[in-house]
Image (spheres, rainbow, N blue to C red):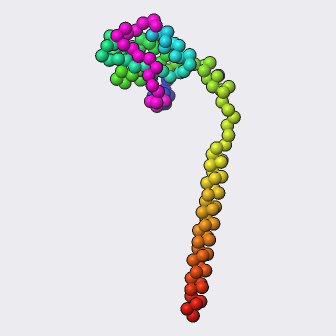
Amino acid sequence: MTGKERAQFRAMANGLKPELQIGKEGMSEGLVAQVLDCFRTKELLKIKVLLDSAPQTPREFADAISEKTGSEVIQVIGGIIVLYKKNDELGKKEEKKKPKKTKPLANVKAKRAAAEKREAEMKKEKRNFYAKKRYFSDNRKG
């Protein structure tokens, strides 16, 4: 995994909430089963390690979990572990669900152009109004 890919996954994980917690029991087969279950529905997983009661460091947990699940450690900060595991089936499901792309940018540009045109017309009307006002005020004096 490249550094850029890792940075993208870190950015994506920023908004995630931890799915699992590791506490005083530490590593168990149940924990590994839960992690694998989470990887069936998502590729990026955030795990919280309770630092006060956990028997190992978060880095040790991250390495052990990634080894048993076949995932990659994206980052370990404080008591938070972020793991990634590619799920090809998940990508296929997302492709099927994607709606046809519309052209929202074209709509935005059209609206912006129409607004600019209205604004230009208003300026022109305002300019004509003041020009007529000056013309008539000058003719009345003379």
**Residue 12 is covered by the magenta coloring:** yes
92 vs 126: above or below: above
Determine the residue positioned at 49% across, 12% down: 34
Determine the residue positioned at 66% across, 47% down: 106
> As drawn, is 91 to the left or to the right of 69?
right
Q: Residue furthest top?
A: 29
Q: Nearer the viewer, residue 39 or 30?
A: 30
Determine the residue positioned at 44% across, 30% down: 14
Q: Main secondary structure of the magenta part?
A: loop
Q: Nearer the viewer, residue 108 or 72?
A: 108
| Stretch of the chain drawn in magenta | 11-30
Q: Quadrant of residue 50?
A: top left
On the question of residue 137 being in view, the answer is yes
On the question of residue 3 being in view, the answer is no
94 vs 65: above or below: below
**Residue 87 is covered by the magenta coloring:** no
> As drawn, is 47 to the left or to the right of 134?
left
Q: Residue furthest left?
A: 52
44 vs 113: above or below: above
Q: Nearer the viewer, residue 71 or 3?
A: 71
- Badge count: 0
> As drawn, is 37 to the left or to the right of 96?
left
Q: Residue furthest right?
A: 100
Query: Where residue 20 appears, x then y in whole percent?
Result: 44, 17
Q: Nearer the viewer, residue 124 or 8?
A: 124
Q: Quadrant of residue 61?
A: top left
Query: Where residue 55 appears, x then y in whole percent?
Result: 32, 10
